[in-house]
Image: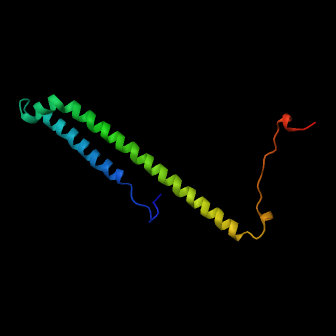
Amino acid sequence: MTPPPDSPPNLLFRAVIIAGSFFAITVMSMVAATFGNPEAPPNRFFNSYGLLIILVETAILLILIFLAMAIDQRRTAQRLHHEQVRKLEQLAQTSQQPDDIQVDIPQSSNPSNTSS
């Protein structure tokens, strides 16, 4: 579903792409470093801080993902609500008589509502 042209883009999705790219580059760098000299500076750096870097990047990525989805869901719900209100207003304007609109009201089956 494409957003309407008047809605601004959700910038958090761009941040998710950037954070995901950093995560992928970090993982590939760690894998590449394992095939090199164990005493090389990148290998020693990843041995010391690799797990911490991956955990921080994962946390940032998860936070951004859930925030982006929550904002997108909220915007979609608001847009759908506005579309429904607009359709109901159009329906109300086109109807000539109030009898044209039928509303089903369920009958209460609670016996305490009957007066004796």
**Which residue occupies the foreground of this view, 94 or 3?**
94
The residue sitting at the front extreme is: 116
Task: State which quarter of the image contains the C terminus.
Answer: top right
Residue 1 or residue 69, whichever sits in front = 69
Percent coordinates x, y for residue 55 in the rendering: 27, 33
Residue 35's x, y, as percent? Answer: 12, 34
Q: Is residue 51 left or right of residue 87?
A: left
Q: Quadrant of residue 91?
A: bottom right
Q: Is residue 22 above or below residue 7?
A: above
Q: Compared with residue 4, is residue 110 higher up or lower down, i.e. above or below?
A: above
The spot of residue 80 in percent (x, y) is 55, 56
> Toward which corner of the image does residue 65 lie, by quadrant?
top left
Q: Is residue 43 above or below residue 95?
A: above
Q: Residue at x 78, y 68 (%)?
A: 97
> Residue at coordinates 15% horizontally, 38% vertically from top-left?
32
Residue 20 is left or right of residue 42, and the answer is right
Q: Nearer the viewer, residue 2 or 56?
A: 56
The residue at 56%/59% (across/down) is 82
Looking at the image, residue 105 lies above or below residue 54: below
Horizontal placement of 8 versus 14: left or right?
Answer: right
How far across and how far down the image is residue 70, in percent? 44, 46
Say which residue appears at 22% left-offset and 30% top-offset: 51
- Residue 93 falls left or right of residue 54: right
Give the tally of numbered discs: 0
Image colouring: rainbow
